[in-house]
Amino acid sequence: MLIDYQKVNIYQQDSLVLKDVDFQVDEGEFIYIIGKVGSGKSSLLKTLYCELDLVEDETEKAEVLGRNLKTLRRKEVPAFRKEMGIIFQDFQLLHDRSVYKNLKFVLKATGWKDKGEIDQRIDDVLNAVGMIDKKDSMPHELSGGEQQRIAIARSLLNHPKVVIADEPTGNLDPETATNIVRLLKDITLQGTAVVMSTHNIPMLDRFPGIVYRCKHGEIKDVTNEYNKLDLSEDEE
């Protein structure tokens, strides 16, 4: 089990946003988290990579990649994050350097030293997302969809066990969004789990996965019923 939350309360500042969270992720699973704006989707994702702290005495079990988040120390977080890929809606590329140098920066920061191995890994992930021809481009020269593909490539650099994607298609046109979700779905074929929050409900039919819904301060597995929902209720 890559992620195992049992009876976890999640707060945003002092406000309880999700109560008694039970949430599990295993290898190779493709998991959607749906729900209205403010329902707790992003807050849940942020707890997974320790951007948002959990309250220890309101957490029965919170294990991610073999770590107990209740006892994980702040100095251990950087090494912990190296084992996961994180994709943001706004890409968060470094705009003062090329695609190649963006990816090289991440590898150097996470302990890679051999230039040949660095170059090979960069080529591998760019080929995986169909962006090898953009290696020397600057981020501002790329479309939104291309920037998101680079962000996905960046998330794959360190062979993550799980990729966490917070609204990765939120700023993209429908065709580009479809291509991005297809790419994320393909990643799971290598055994990497993907956890993705989204408002793009039609994607759930096109690329089936496990579906959790955040609503009224709770999160529930609705995989067997999501296509029966009033879809307008879950869209922004």
Image (cartoon, grey):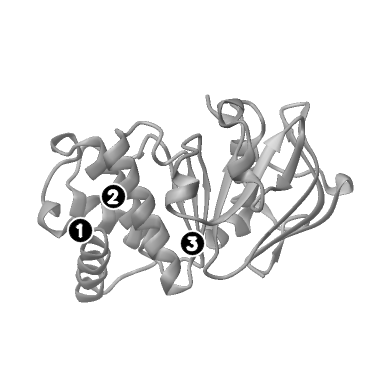
Label 3 Cα neighbours within 10 Å, binned few <14 / some 14-19 / many ≥20: many
Residue to which mark 1 is pinned? 130
| Mark 1 Cα-neighbour bin, 10 Å: few <14, some 14–19, many ≥20 | some
Residue 231 x %, y %:
57, 32
**Residue 20 shows up from this direction:** yes
Of pointers 1 and 3, the one earlier in the residue sequence:
3
Relative placement, left or right, of 137 versus 67 is left
Instruction: Identify the element where label 2 is drawn.
Output: helix
Tag in front: 3 or 2 = 2
Query: In this figure, which residue is indicated by the disc labeled 3?
Result: 82
* Distance Cα–Cα, label 3 vs label 2: 19 Å
Quadrant where the N terminus sits is: bottom right
The foreground one among 204 and 133 is 204
Q: Position of residue 220 (x, y in %)?
A: 73, 46
First along the sequence among labels 2 and 1 = 1
Q: Residue at x 46, y 37 (%)?
A: 200
Residue 201 lies left or right of residue 33; in this view the side is left
Q: Residues within 10 Å of mark 2 (few under 14, many from 20)?
A: many
Q: State the image coordinates of residue 76 (x, y, percent, origin top left).
A: 62, 59
The quadrant in which residue 105 appears is bottom left
